[in-house]
Image: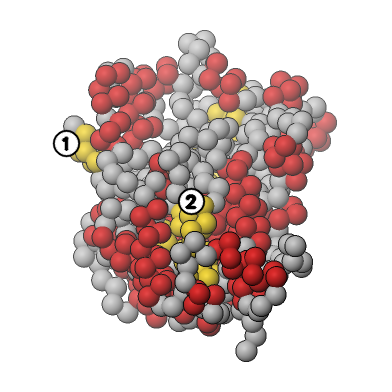
């Protein structure tokens, strides 16, 4: 029998094996080193990642399952990212977390890993890392918060912040009331309870085949999450014996399934960059166009904020992810496998919808076509994305004059200026917010609307940006414009007053300026001077090597996998 990975550290009677074992003892009995699998629990618990604070408790239950199945569980705290806390944007650190986690998985004497994540970037970073290290791996999604109520109605994390803050700006909600809503919104442990990025990526982790079937979407405070964590501990030991690795679980079919699910769930646009980045680590061929081709015609079945009304708690009660997947079963790749070794679709037989208000049956969708549309044109030669389900239908075909902002600071300084020349027909353009320009591609594309238009009752306008938008946001927002302004994209050469032509049905995004004239223009100096120019450290490495949104915004040298081998001994 081939020596296990941990056995390469602990097996034998030589000096090195002695050192590896002796320092690990601290209570571990001798039989811990008899060749049984050592399982890392890559744990993103952190007091500064409030959505993941409860993961230490989850880890304890994973440990019980690992012990029960004959493995040795080892807690491995890894870089964590609190979406609401870290500046300039958590996305700047996604690749750093993925790189650090990958290296620690490879460097340590472990045979497999359980990945504990929750808040937006944590599950993508964990999956990217696991894909590149390619050790047997399984995710326990930390789960969403319970629904909080304010003024007698449910409050959705994120989505209602935008709504309430617009009420404050429109003068219909007082500052004290606004503040009082804070603890109603964040009612329990867990991540945002809207169909934002965290919910989306937790659910898609399961669709990719990477969780215990039926676990994703279980609310964080629910006992069933701990039960699932225990079962996952047992499962990873079995997976280790079967050598069931991310590269065998996550195939092109798994990603196409994730794209179908993303549409049916009404998931976050951020899933586009995350799925592309994970696929890039696996060498799975996946392009931005696959999202449009495979997802655009998929019906929206889940009535959750921000596109709809309900929250993650409701989705779970209504039958959860499996009930949704069962409705679109014919669109799923029947071969795509999971951590159980069985295809995803095999786990859907018992799925039922228990509340048709929350999960619509296929014949009565919320929207007939709900996926992400990918637009091209002289404003986005490498593409841009828009989520029609979160947009205003009447704005999906629109022609209007650009009002251009050179940076987020410029936007904030001028947006509410009563003299700003803007109408409801204007198109707000914000540049310098791509991966290189900001840096880190922040969630600023869903620009607030000018106060004077809000006061007139305007609630949506066409907005265009090279950044991302929060998965909890809504509106007619064209985002991920590639190449970004700071990478030579035409967005840098648009001027206020240029006519912008958005045509989502035709998948076009253009500025009505002759190509020769657009090419001859210099990038706007005010925009150029606002681009990030970090002189050292991670930010410099990031800006110099980050790829554009249309391929997942990973660092160029992190694409691909190095497997689990380490070349040399440490002593
Ligand atoms: Fe953590 Fe929303 S802030 S999931
Ligand atoms: Mg977010």
Mark-to-mark CA distance, 2 and 1: 34 Å
163 with respect to 208 (left or right)? left
Q: Where's the N terminus, which quadrant? A: bottom right
- Residue 439: percent from the left, percent from the top? 65, 35
- Residue 371: percent from the left, percent from the top? 47, 56
Name the image quarter holding residue 493.
top right
Mark 2 and mark 1 residues within 8 Å of each other at the beta carbon: no
Q: Residue at x 46, y 64 (%)?
A: 27
Q: Residue at x 28, y 77 (%)?
A: 350
Labels in figure, total: 2
Mark 2 Cα shell of 10 Å, populated few (<14), some (14-19), many (≥20): many
Q: Which of marks 2 and 1 is nearer the N terminus?
A: 2
Q: Name the residue under label 1.
A: 152
Q: In this orientation, which residue lies closer to the viewer: 401 or 337? A: 337
435 with respect to 294 (left or right)? right
Q: Is residue 528 above or below residue 134?
A: above
Q: In this orientation, which residue lies closer to the viewer: 96 or 509? A: 96
Name the image quarter holding residue 568.
bottom right
Mark 1 Cα shell of 10 Å, populated few (<14), some (14-19), many (≥20): few
Q: In this orientation, which residue lies closer to the viewer: 250 or 500? A: 250
Q: Is residue 17 above or below residue 78?
A: below
Q: Is mark 2 on a helix, strand or loop?
A: loop
Q: Which residue is drawn at 55% across and 16% down?
A: 413
- Scheme of colours in the image: secondary structure
Find residue 44 and name its label. 2
Q: Where's the C terminus, which quadrant? A: bottom right
Task: Find the residue positioned furthest to the top.
Answer: 419
Task: Find the residue positioned furthest to the left.
Answer: 152
């Amino acid at each position: 029998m081939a020596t296990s990975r941990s056995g390469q550290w602990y097996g034998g009677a030589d000096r090195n094996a002695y050192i590896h074992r002796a320092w690990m003892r601290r209570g571990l009995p001798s039989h811990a080193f008899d060749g049984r699998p050592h399982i890392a629990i890559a744990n993103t618990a952190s007091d500064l990642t409030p959505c993941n604070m409860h993961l230490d408790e989850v880890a304890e239950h994973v440990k019980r399952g690992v012990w029960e199945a004959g493995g040795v569980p080892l807690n491995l705290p890894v870089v964590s990212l609190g979406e609401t806390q870290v500046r300039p944007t958590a996305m700047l650190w996604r690749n750093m977390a993925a790189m650090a986690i990958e290296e620690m998985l490879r460097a340590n004497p472990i045979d497999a890993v359980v990945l504990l994540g929750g808040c937006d970037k944590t599950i993508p970073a964990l999956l990217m890392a696991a894909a590149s290290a390619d050790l047997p791996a399984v995710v326990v999604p930390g789960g969403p918060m319970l629904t909080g109520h304010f003024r007698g109605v449910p409050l959705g994390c994120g989505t209602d912040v935008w709504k309430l803050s617009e009420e404050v700006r429109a003068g219909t909600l007082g500052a004290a009331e606004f503040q009082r809503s804070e603890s109603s919104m964040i009612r329990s442990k867990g991540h945002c309870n809207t169909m934002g990025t965290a919910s989306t990526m937790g659910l898609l982790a399961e669709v990719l085949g990477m969780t215990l079937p039926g676990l994703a979407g279980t609310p964080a405070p629910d006992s069933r999450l701990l039960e699932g964590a225990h079962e996952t501990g047992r499962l990873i030991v079995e997976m280790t014996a079967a050598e069931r690795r991310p590269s065998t679980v996550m195939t092109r079919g798994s990603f196409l399934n994730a794209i179908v699910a993303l549409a049916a769930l009404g998931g976050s646009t951020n899933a586009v960059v995350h799925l592309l980045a994970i696929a890039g680590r696996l060498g799975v061929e996946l392009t931005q166009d696959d999202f449009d081709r495979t997802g655009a015609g998929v019906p929206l079945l889940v009535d959750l904020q921000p596109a709809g009304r309900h929250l993650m708690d409701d989705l779970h009660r209504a039958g959860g992810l499996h009930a949704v997947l069962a409705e679109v079963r014919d669109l799923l790749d029947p071969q795509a496998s999971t951590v159980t070794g069985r295809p995803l679709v095999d786990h859907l037989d018992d799925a039922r919808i228990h509340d048709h208000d929350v999960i619509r049956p296929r014949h009565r969708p919320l929207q007939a076509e709900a996926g992400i549309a990918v637009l091209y044109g002289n404003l986005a030669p490498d593409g841009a994305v828009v989520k029609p389900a979160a947009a205003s239908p009447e704005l999906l075909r629109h022609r209007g004059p650009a009002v251009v902002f050179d940076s987020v600071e410029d936007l904030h300084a001028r947006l509410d200026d009563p003299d700003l020349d803007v109408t409801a027909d204007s198109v707000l353009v914000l540049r310098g917010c791509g991966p290189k320009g900001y840096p880190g591609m922040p969630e600023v594309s869903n620009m607030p609307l000018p106060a004077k238009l809000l006061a007139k009752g305007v609630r949506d306008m066409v907005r265009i940006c090279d950044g991302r938008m929060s998965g909890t946001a809504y509106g007619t927002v064209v985002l991920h414009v590639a190449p970004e302004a700071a990478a030579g994209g035409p967005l840098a050469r648009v001027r206020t007053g240029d006519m912008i032509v958005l045509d989502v049905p035709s998948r076009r995004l253009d500025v009505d300026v002759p190509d020769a004239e657009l090419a001859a223009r210099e990038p706007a100096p005010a925009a150029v001077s606002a681009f990030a120019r970090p002189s050292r450290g991670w930010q410099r490495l990031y800006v110099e090597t980050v790829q554009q949104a249309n391929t997942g915004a990973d660092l160029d040298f992190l694409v691909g996998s190095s497997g689990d081998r380490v070349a040399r001994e440490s002593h």
